Amino acid sequence: MKKFLIIGASFFAIAAVPFLSAPDDPAIPPRVRATFPASWRFQAGTSASFAPHAMVASDSRIAAEAGAEILKQGGNAVDAAVATGFALAVAYPEAGNLGGGGYMVIRLADGRVAALDYREVAPLAASRDMYVGADGKVNGESVIGPKASGVPGAVAGMLEAHRRYGSLPIAKVLAPALGLATDGFIVDSVFNRSVGQAKYRIENFAGRATFLKSDAPPAIGSRFTQPALARTIKLIADSGAVAFYRGSIADSIAAEMQRSGGLISKEDLARYRPVWRQPIRSSYRGYSLISMPPSSSGGTTITEMLNILEAYSEPAKFGSADEIHAVTSASQRAFIDRNAKLGDPSFVKVPAELTSKTYARAIAKTISRHRADPTTGLASQIREGNETTHYSVVDRFGNAVATTTTINDLYGSGVYVSGAGFFLNDEMDDFTSKPGTPNMFGLIQGSANAIAPGKRMLSAMSPTIVLDPKGQLLLVAGARGGPRIIAATSQIILNVIDHRMSLADAMSAPRMHHQSLPDSVQLEPGGFDKAVIARLGEMGHFVYERGGVAGAAAIMRVKGGYEGMDDPRSRGGAAVGY
Ligand code: DON
């Protein structure tokens, strides 16, 4: 049976296309409709957006439209990713940014791959114990205010990606973002609510004059313009990243830091460089993965987890106690390694074994079929032997880009660069402020991720590209949500490969998370049968049902084109294409 779906309604000509549940390309196995418990908030069998040629999926519809406009103008996936990134900085400032950093994984249609690390670095004036007070306790300065920011990498990174792989002039790529900042956009309920929720964070700093005029978030239906940000984007379009790192924008950042007592200096900005890295290449049951190496933990942790699962057993039924036990036990083990061993590769030696199949086989043997193991026991045993946004892009040539970018919390540190018009991150909290003390995501990390001047803080961001067994592009995915990014991204991959779900089902399926410490399994409420939860308890898992596990944005190749979708858990996102 064919269902029909309306695509591109908000932006491009409306077209009706068949939703294909059984592509006849043998490399794309037929999808099997998922079954979710009646108590789960999303239904199985819904449709993603479809586009025959090219597509952007993002947490912001406005930014996805900006990227799609560049694709339509003949830009490639990297042009569109950069256009989307800058548009996010304007229209989705809770997470989109010029004052943060990110990671980009690229796979070109000719098979070349690349990974760009434009993560923030600790300022030169940072030190290992800078957030530990005289009482020995971690203070709150890594999460709010001027001392929370790492040196931003976003502008350098996006311009470097464009320099190497872009095809349109940068001024053309930045035009949609410039237009959005200059002419403004209409405030919707999502933006209004987002600013309202972060009022406590914004109101103490210079962003108050733009975001909290009359002490309230911009009114729904009003037009929101950002003239200072427009000037900044124009300067970057005219002079490149140098305007940000050495020119008048650098002056504004340094002045803001001096005014408020922050650490980032002009020297920090002048020294910042994005780094091209070899992506992690791994495989899972015949499919190939291209993912982000350290300084993000995302690719390493997902690879270790999937390798363990592949070695452990054939996939159990989705939502069964056996499946949850396998996935969360593999995640627990991979996070133990992540939290203890990973850090910026310029500062710590990352053990190569973490992504090896041999190592994963040995770990898989430690997972009992019937019993959960406490993290404390495993950690020694193994040693011996909110805000981020992800977007996915494909172009009509078959190039693919997965990008995740962040300022960590909603509106970052709250500090807003006067005159330049953007928020600075609070990424310093991703470092280990004090070994054994949890950060804002409850992650307990080790000295490999200790603070040092010029060092990148460990991330969980996981932009990932999956190829089918024939080596053709299948999936472009990633998420927001701190360590839960790893859970969401890996489970979308498992849902597509192991459970043959459609993209919409794979994104809507209930998720689980285990990050080793706290030693517990988080399940999304209502997503799993009560009997299954009871069984997990009998096996020794500490299970709790809470919240949403991350928010993803993904694109999947299907017959005749692409399906794309922003996470149904998020509001205001879209996949837009033509
Ligand atoms: O890099 C990281 O892992 C974190 N700074 C990501 C933060 C995040 O995803 C918050 N968003 N919801």
Image (spheres, rainbow, N blue to C red):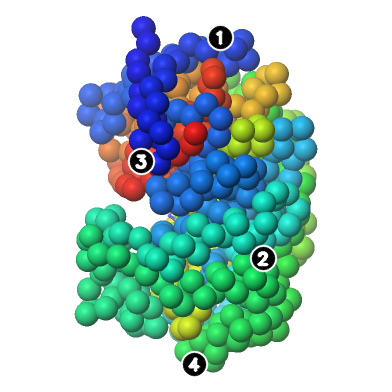
Q: Residue 469 or 78: which is nearer the viewer?
A: 78
Residue 392 placement: quadrant? top right
Q: Which residue occupies 46% across, 83% down?
A: 418
Residue that protrudes farthest toward the bottom in the picture: 259
Q: Which residue occupies 30% across, 41% down?
A: 545
The CA distance from mark 1 to mark 2 is 42 Å
Q: On the picture, is 113 further left or further right than 199? A: right
State whether residue 312 appears in this view: yes
> Which of label 4 and label 2 is nearer to you?
2
Q: Residue 215 or 431: which is nearer the viewer?
A: 215
Give yes or no for contact between labels 1 and 2 (Cβ–Cβ under 8 Å): no
Q: Amino acid at mark 1?
A: Asp
Q: Under 8 Å from ligand 1: the CB of mark 1?
A: no
Helix or strand or loop: what does disc 4 sit on?
helix
For mark 1, does the 10 Å Cα neighbourhood hold few (<14), some (14 to 19), or many (20 or more) residues? few
Q: Is residue 355 above or below residue 168?
A: above
Which sits earlier in the primary sequence, circle 3 or circle 4? 3
Residue 50 placement: quadrant? top left
The CA distance from mark 2 to mark 3 is 32 Å
Which sits earlier in the primary sequence, circle 4 or circle 2? 2
Which sits earlier in the primary sequence, circle 1 or circle 2? 1
Q: Under 8 Å from ligand 1: the CB of mark 4?
A: no
Q: Which residue occupies 63% across, 15% down?
A: 27
> Which of label 1 and label 4 is nearer to you?
1
Which sits earlier in the primary sequence, circle 2 or circle 3? 3
Q: Quadrant of the N terminus?
A: top left
Q: Which residue occupies 59% across, 55% down?
A: 173
State whether residue 488 appears in this view: no
Q: Residue 335 or 256: which is nearer the viewer?
A: 256
